Amino acid sequence: MGRLDGKVIVLTAAAQGIGRATAIAFAREGAKVIATDINESKLQELEKYPGIQTRVLDVTKKKQIDEFVNEIERVDILFNVAGFVHHGTILDCEEKDWDFSMNLNVRSMYLMIKAFLPKDLGRSRGCGKRGERPSQLVRRVRLICKMSLFVSAVLHEYQ
């Protein structure tokens, strides 16, 4: 029995690097992993692992996210891995690079969290890890979301 038996995990940027390693590790621990990425050919390589199903998804596209969310019955864990770090200093960073980075690193997290959170609020087993009421969970997620998006934006842009 694995530590994640019965859990459904949605993972972004799963085709390579940290996302790929995490998808494989979660599946080995018994989770049903829904691995997403924009790189379809690399993503298909994950289908050989038991417990992993794949889905092409561009996390910067709200319409694609909304369609994806409607296809999924439940999610226990949402792991937003997608990100981009511009190489060079702020002086080397063009406005289009900055916009792309903010869109992928920050806005995509917002879109994913906002789309998936109502699925968790509607679950009958109680909300959140501690059996919180929906209003408590929303307050906690709101705070976590604000903090993580801010930290992500700052860390990614000033590395």
Image: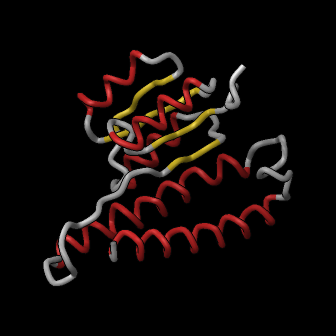
- 13 to 29, vertically: above or below: below
> Which residue is located at x 30 percent, y 59 percent?
84
Q: Where is residue 21 in the image (x, y as percent from the top left)?
A: 43, 35
- 120 to 15, vertically: above or below: below
Q: Where is residue 80 in the image (x, y as percent from the top left)?
A: 48, 51
Q: Where is residue 10 in the image (x, y as percent from the top left)?
A: 52, 39
Count how many numbered circles sit on residues in the image. Answer: 0
**In which quadrant of the rendered image does the N terminus lie?**
top right
> Which residue is located at x 50 percent, y 70 percent?
149
Q: Position of residue 113 (x, y in %)?
A: 55, 57
Query: How is colour applied across the structure in the image?
Result: secondary structure
Q: For this view, does 151 lie left or right of residue 17?
A: right
Q: For this view, does 152 lie left or right of residue 144?
A: left
**In which quadrant of the rendered image does the C terminus lie?**
bottom left
- 101 to 67, vertically: above or below: below
- 134 to 1, vertically: above or below: below
> Which residue is located at x 22 percent, y 81 percent?
90
Quadrant in the picture for residue 155: bottom left
The furthest residue to the bottom: 91
